[in-house]
Image (tube, rainbow, N blue to C red):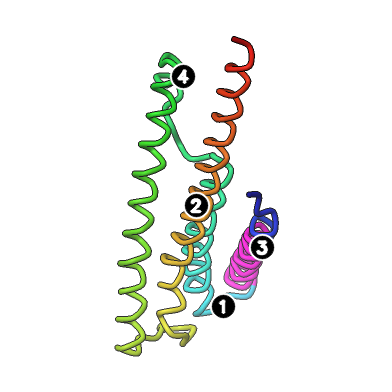
């Protein structure tokens, strides 16, 4: 179950967001140091862009298996125990992401009800908070995809070993 289209959308979003944040930061620095003025909204834009980049980037890391792990200890375990540890890590990660979806959505709803807006950009705060549940849902998709992929490869390995006997 490969979802290349999702990786492309996430990658494009991250590329555009990082480029936009970098461009706004560069322009603001040039304005400040060469012209003695700056924009009031630049730091706010960069901050909110970084929030989105963080949560979407975390989902990409889940998809590519790039999160920090301690492989040193896992390499010394038997393949069976290694599989159990991987299942445990997937389940804990899923649980954490479910909590992020639930409480992130509550934060979004609260912000919608209160009508909070950002000071400089004057956008609704729920657009910023929406990064939490969106990133967590994308992470859940990638975690489940990785679990299925690992179980398929484990089943294929077990079937091959069974044929050798």
- The residue wearing badge 2 is 58
Earlier along the polypeptide chain: callout 2 or callout 1?
1
| Along the line of sight, the residue nearer the viewer: 20 or 156 | 156
Which element is circle 1 on?
loop
- The residue wearing badge 1 is 37
Q: Are marks 4 and 1 in contact (CB under 8 Å)?
A: no
- The residue wearing badge 4 is 79
Which element is circle 2 on?
helix
- Whether residue 77 is in magenta: the answer is no
Q: The C terminus is located in which quarter?
A: top right
Q: Are marks 2 and 3 in contact (CB under 8 Å)?
A: no
Note whether 43 is above or below 64 in the view shown: below
Numbered disc in front, either 4 or 1: 4
Note whether 49 is above or below 117 in the view shown: above
- Whether residue 11 is in magenta: the answer is yes
Task: Report the magenta stretch's main SS.
Answer: helix
| Residue for point 46% across, 61% down | 137
Q: Are marks 1 and 3 in contact (CB under 8 Å)?
A: no
Which element is circle 4 on?
helix
Numbered disc in front, either 1 or 3: 3
Q: Over which residues does the magenta segment extend?
A: 10-34
Q: Are marks 4 and 2 in contact (CB under 8 Å)?
A: no
Earlier along the polypeptide chain: callout 4 or callout 1?
1
- The residue wearing badge 3 is 9
Numbered disc in front, either 4 or 2: 4
Earlier along the polypeptide chain: callout 3 or callout 4?
3
| For residue 64, side relative to residue 129 (left or right) | right
């Amino acid at each position: 179950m490969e979802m290349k289209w999702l990786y492309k959308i996430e990658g494009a979003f991250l590329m555009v967001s990082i480029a936009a944040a970098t461009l706004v930061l560069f322009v603001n620095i040039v304005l400040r140091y060469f012209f003695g003025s700056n924009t009031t909204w630049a730091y706010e834009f960069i901050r909110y862009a970084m929030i989105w980049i963080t949560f979407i980037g975390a989902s990409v890391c889940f998809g590519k298996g790039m999160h920090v792990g301690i492989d040193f200890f896992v390499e010394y375990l038997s393949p069976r125990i290694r599989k159990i540890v991987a299942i445990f890590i997937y389940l804990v990660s899923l649980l954490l992401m479910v909590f992020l979806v639930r409480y992130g959505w509550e934060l979004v709803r609260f912000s919608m009800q209160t009508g909070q807006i950002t000071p400089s950009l004057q956008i609704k705060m729920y657009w910023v908070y929406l990064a939490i549940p969106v990133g967590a849902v994308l992470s859940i998709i990638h975690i489940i995809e990785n679990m299925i992929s690992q179980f398929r490869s484990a089943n294929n390995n077990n079937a091959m070993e069974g044929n050798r006997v």
